[in-house]
Image: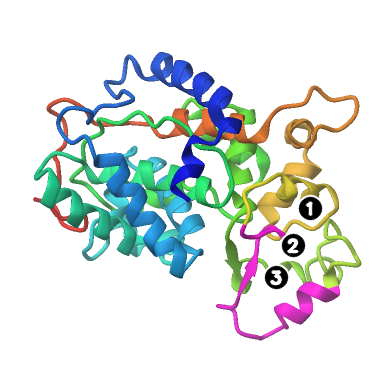
Amino acid sequence: MKGAYTNPRFFLAMTVMLAMAAALVQAQGTRVGFYARTCPRAESIVRSAVQSRFRSNPNIAPGLLRMHFHDCFVQGCDASVLIDGPNTEKTAPPNRLLRGYEVIDDAKTQLEAACPGVVSCADILALAARDSVFLTRGINWAVPTGRRDGRVSLASDTTILPGFRESIDSQKQKFAAFGLNTQDLVALVGGHTIGTSACQLFSYRLYNFTNGGPDPTINSAFVPQLQALCPQNGDGSRRIDLDTGSGNRFDTSFFANLRNGRGILESDQKLWTDPSTRTFVQRFLGERGSRPLNFNVEFARSMVKMSNIGVKTGTNGEIRRICSAIN
């Protein structure tokens, strides 16, 4: 897998991403190659930690991607989602099903041995999210680093996270608050091309949704399949692929499923039923008559924008020695 990071198919995308990343983050204080002198092996250590866990449990890839998103939307990208304790972000309902904390701990332990007190937990999480996408056959992009870790983590702050029943207008408002536009919203939600959802988060769509029947936006031929996987009053913790048929590969199949009425989460399916977001779904799919967008490249662009929300740099924040504990 190591050689895959130099695969020629990524050279053009990487060139674009390097130029774009430099322009985007100049004012924020993060930059590509921040640790080149202080901890030259930082990115390779993180990548190795992710790869090691991914080999035995591929589910950590979507877990790390979600974790980075949930971190950035609450208090900015400062690793506050990693902090243990009562009433911290980690304990809030939207975060209780997050996975991959052990990967961050593995990487941090190795980094502290190689470069004590240098690499932040926030940067580890940003790098791990990138590596997770690449390991699932998505794009590899340059991640600006130089974030510092926050000291505040409150469960009550997680209400800003978009919910699985949320309207498109509400989602757009929440993204816009962080400088993310409608295209960014569709691209980032497209990260659901990998990973799973618990039945308890969508089974209400299958039974007594309207007039005693299922959600009419679900393809009628797909309903029996979902009902068999998530029976009424069944195990709500059972997990189902968010991208049916391609849950372990980072691709545009997720958008094709939305077009075909096979979205799992209500908030995901709304990307197709709402005209303002459907346009971008069609462009990512390269539909005839639309102006095609390369999903991988645009996802990476949106990730760089998102990963610089509210970053702490310079003398702000701290470098945690243990990611789950404030120094």
- Looking at the image, residue 280 lies above or below residue 219: above
Image mark for residue 245: 2
Report the amino acid beneath label 3.
Tyr
Report the amino acid beneath label 2.
Gly
**Image location of residue 285, percent across then percent down:** 78, 37
From this viewpoint, is residue 207 visible?
no
Q: Which color mode does the image show?
A: rainbow
**Which residue does the numbered mark 3 point to in the structure image?**
204
Earlier in the chain: of badge 2 and badge 3, it is 3
In this view, the mark in front (1 or 3): 1
Where residue 210 sits, quadrant-wise, is bottom right
Q: Give the range drawn in magenta.
A: 224-248
Q: Residue at x 51, y 45 (%)?
A: 134
**Which residue does the numbered mark 1 point to in the structure image?**
257
Q: Does the magenta stretch include residue 139?
A: no
**Pointers 2 and 1 in contact (CB under 8 A)?**
yes
Neighbour class for label 1 at 10 Å: few (<14), some, many (≥20)?
many
Tell me how many marks there are.
3
Q: Locate residue 6 relative to residue 122 in the image: left or right.
A: right
**Pointers 2 and 3 in contact (CB under 8 A)?**
no
Report the amino acid beneath label 1.
Asn
Mark 2 to mark 1 CA distance (whole Å): 9 Å
Earlier in the chain: of badge 1 and badge 3, it is 3
**Image location of residue 14, percent across then percent down:** 51, 26
Helix, strand or loop at label 2? It is loop
Helix, strand or loop at label 3? It is helix
**Image location of residue 152, percent across then percent down:** 21, 47
